[in-house]
Image (cartoon, rainbow, N blue to C red):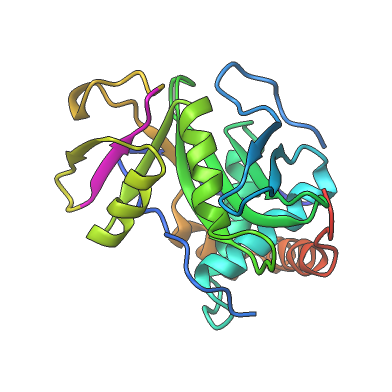
């Protein structure tokens, strides 16, 4: 069994979401705020898609590895692996995060997202989001966010006007200025009325993860192997 990462989960007031960009290329707890599988109509006429809560442990690790690589980029050094390890070893270990996939009518994943619970378990923050190559679905990441905004108590963070416009098209209509320069968006089902009663998100110190890799080779090699295995076994269908 792999050693636990020697890092402490810290509560943070905000985290910057990485918006969709062009691609370079065990079971989780059932909780009231977690998203269930659902069929939706895509942005392309006649295309039926499905939101899948990826619960199978092997598939979940594979989807998380792919999401980290796509979001951070293939030339991002240690960042994708550190994000993978922190999410898997801290957030998912505490049942505080889940991976969602949007699949096309043939079950192929066309978008991935990571949702993280707040400290009180009342809402979820969109921590990572990425479209995957698809010939059949237009703007799959937007379709995924649109569905999540209607079904989950969702929070998003926009770092610029383009991100805010994209999330607004997805149904995120309440926006607030966060002191560190982000725009915080809340979906229709989010319980907060503004920043004053916004639940704190759960996160981790990515720098501490990197330090743990340097201090313990076994931890590094263990998560590296799981990361590589996940990428090699990314499911064609869910």
Give me the residue at 54% from left, 47% from top.
143
Return the residue nearer the eye: 102 or 45: 45
Residue 126 placed where, x, y %?
46, 43
Residue 224 placed where, x, y %?
72, 68
60 is higher (above) or lower (below) than 26:
below
Taking 92 as reference, is 238 left or right? right
Q: Is residue 141 magenta?
A: no
Return the residue nearer the eye: 171 or 73: 171
Residue 8 appears in view: no
44 is higher (above) or lower (below) than 191:
below
Give me the residue at 48% from left, 28% from top.
150
Q: Is residue 185 magenta?
A: yes
Residue 22 placed where, x, y %?
51, 73
Give me the residue at 45% from left, 25% from top.
153
121 is higher (above) or lower (below) than 108:
above
Place residue 136 in its image quadrant: bottom right
Instruction: Look at the image and give the residue range highlighted in magenta.
Output: 182-188
Residue 67 placed where, x, y %?
62, 60
Taking 227 as reference, is 34 left or right? left
Residue that lies at the very extreme toward the front in this rendered image: 45
Q: How many numbered dots are placed on residues in this image?
A: 0
Give me the residue at 47% from left, 69% from top.
21
158 is higher (above) or lower (below) than 116:
below
Residue that lies at the very extreme toward the bottom in this rendered image: 75
Residue 98 appears in view: yes
């Amino acid at each position: 069994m792999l050693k636990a990462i020697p890092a402490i989960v810290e509560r943070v007031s905000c985290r910057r979401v990485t918006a969709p960009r062009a691609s370079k290329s065990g079971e989780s707890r059932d909780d009231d705020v977690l998203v269930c599988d659902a069929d939706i109509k895509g942005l392309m006429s006649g295309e039926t898609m499905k939101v899948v809560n990826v619960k199978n442990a092997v598939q979940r690790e594979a989807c998380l590895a792919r999401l980290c690589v796509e979001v951070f980029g293939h030339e991002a050094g240690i960042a994708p692996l550190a994000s993978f390890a922190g999410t898997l070893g801290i957030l998912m270990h505490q049942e505080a995060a889940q991976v969602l996939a949007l699949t096309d009518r043939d079950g192929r994943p066309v978008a991935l997202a990571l949702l993280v619970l707040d400290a009180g378990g009342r809402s979820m923050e969109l921590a990572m989001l990425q479209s995957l190559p698809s010939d059949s679905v237009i703007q799959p990441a937007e379709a995924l966010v649109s569905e999540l905004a209607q079904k989950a108590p969702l929070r998003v963070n926009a770092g610029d006007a383009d991100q805010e416009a994209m999330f607004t098209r997805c149904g995120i209509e309440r926006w607030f200025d966060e002191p560190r320069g982000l725009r915080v968006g809340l979906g229709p089902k989010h319980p907060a009325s503004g920043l004053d009663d916004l639940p704190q998100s759960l996160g981790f110190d990515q720098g501490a993860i990197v330090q743990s890799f340097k201090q313990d080779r076994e931890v590094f090699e263990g998560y590296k192997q799981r990361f590589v295995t996940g990428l090699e076994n990314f499911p064609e269908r869910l």
